[in-house]
Image (cartoon, rainbow, N blue to C red):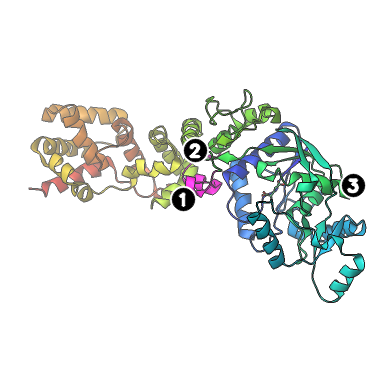
Amino acid sequence: MRVRFAPSPTGQLHVGNARTALFNWLLARGSNGTFILRIEDTDAERSTRESEGEILRDLRWLGLDWDEGPDVGGPRGPYRQSERLHLYQSYAKELLGADAAYYCFCSTAQLGAEREEAVAAGRTARYAGTCRRLSRDQAAARIAAGERPAIRFRVPEARDVVFTDIVRGDVRFHTDVIGDPVIVRADGHPAYNFAVVVDDALMEVTHVIRGEDHISNTPRQVLLNEALGFTPPEFAHLSLVMGPDHSPLSKRHGATSVAEFRSRGYLPEALVNYLALIGWSPRGPAAGRTAGDDAELLPIEELVRRFSLDRVGHSAGVFDEEKLAWANRHYLKTADAVRLARLSLPYFAEAGVRMAPDDRGLEFLASALAMASSSVDRLNQVPGRLAFLFDYAPARTLADAALREELSADAARSVVAALAEELAPAPRLDRERFRAAAHQVKARTGQKGRALFHPIRVALTGRAEGPELDLAVPAIDHGAELPESAGIPKIIGNRERAAAFSRALGGIP
Ligand code: GLU
């Protein structure tokens, strides 16, 4: 099996296209097949190398590696259409020679007018066939006179084109509704329908798996295969990924690109797993179901093992970010802690905490992350949960009117003062030592429950809420112990925090 993902580098990788890539990849990996990445950049105005680079980066981030492609090469290259123009030229010549294609001199303005007329009259717009009847000599004369024609494929008249789609069964089109498509534009660039046929044939693609927005292109491609003497590949058209209102997922639904979901803090395995469940179910076609309804989260190896096209449904799959968040929560809980620590660095940087931790620093972050990762949906929420470690300033805490009032009451003051005294001579706190210290403060002040622990929390974390103190307090001192070389920004220890907070309270009448 040879399959391909063929993005046009005209923007970010949309999650719908990422799902197409994923389905192709799963099939290739599950059948010892080959996964090809082909860049369809013949639209010179809209294609950019930057977008190509981003698409490659996002596929890699998802873990979808390719066996042949623009960067890795392969036996059927080149894998960028812009580097294959000579091939399209030569096949177009062949079709011209066989009279299966003809030169078309119609101007854009003329074609536009014809289209408008058809639409106004309620007809489907298709090429009127003006240049179909030009003789070779007439065409040659016009070219000699300096006109630059496009090349059109001559669609055979009055017959059916039938192909069997793996997802939708037999699909039939009558050629009378298919206008002759342009295969090479006047500027010499091939049109999509032509390039795709030449490339799929030369790259020996066996299965074309793509979005159903291409289903109406398929009869043209079947006919072009026929005219060029190629055996057409098998086709499978996937239903599109929809927003909650059942229209194709687009900007107005919110995030649509892989890059956006990454920057929101989703893990690649969560996105991959969730995308696999849109329109496919490990238990049978997911007709009418919202992806994720069957609460089936499978690691990638298991997806590879179980994926097959006969369990792909043909009704549209709805993308539900809540379900994605659910998958993400699952993977945040099960992912390797040090990996999560590494993955969280860009989100910390975005939140203003820049760091380049070494192994010790990563290990510290990983243990701190354990406090946060069970209570967040996404990695970008982690820095907020752990801000108390890096950002501690009693004056700022006490600028909050409610906290100021709470902490400057006599009972709370006595708790903070006793805490500062208890910690002054104490070694760094682990959980047991913290409990013992809290016990001493309780004995000295007579405060208990919230009246004891809330002032302690505010004094040590600078915040009214956060992770369990039993975890947060030891994490603060673990961080404070780290040498500078660990690459973690300086963390103020509990002892110093208690003293500073007590001093700050002393300044409040
Ligand atoms: N470049 C086309 C697209 O991005 C590829 C379609 C196909 O797979 O044939 O939609």
Identify whether 411 is placed above or below 251: above
Q: Residue 184: x, y in percent?
A: 78, 60
Left or right: where 8 falls relative to 155: left
Compared across the picture, whether 43 is left or right of 194 comes to left
Q: Which numbered dot is residue 356?
A: 1
Q: Which residue lies furthest to the bottom in this view?
A: 145
| Residue 210 placement (x, y as % from top left) | 69, 42
Judged from the image, the secondary structure of the residue bearing numbered disc 1 is loop
Amino acid tagged 3: Gly
Q: Which of marks 1 and 2 is in front?
A: 2
What residue is shown with label 3?
229
Residue 244: assigned label: 2
- Between 130 and 433, the residue placed more toward the observer is 130
Can the viewer see residue 485?
Answer: yes
Whole-percent x and y of residue 354? 42, 52
Measured Cα–Cα span from mark 2 to mark 3: 44 Å
Give the residues drawn in magenta, as a range. 249-268
Q: Which residue is drawn at 64% across and 39% down?
A: 22
**Badge 1 or badge 2: first in the primary sequence:** 2
Measure the C-alpha gap from mark 1 to mark 2.
Answer: 40 Å
State the CA–CA distance, disc 1 to disc 3: 58 Å
Q: Kindly identify the residue that appears in the image at 21 percent across and 34 percent down.
A: 454
Task: State yes or no: discs 2 and 3 in contact (Cβ < 8 Å).
Answer: no
Contact flag, marks 1 and 2 (Cβ < 8 Å): no
Mark 1 belongs to which amino acid? Answer: Ala
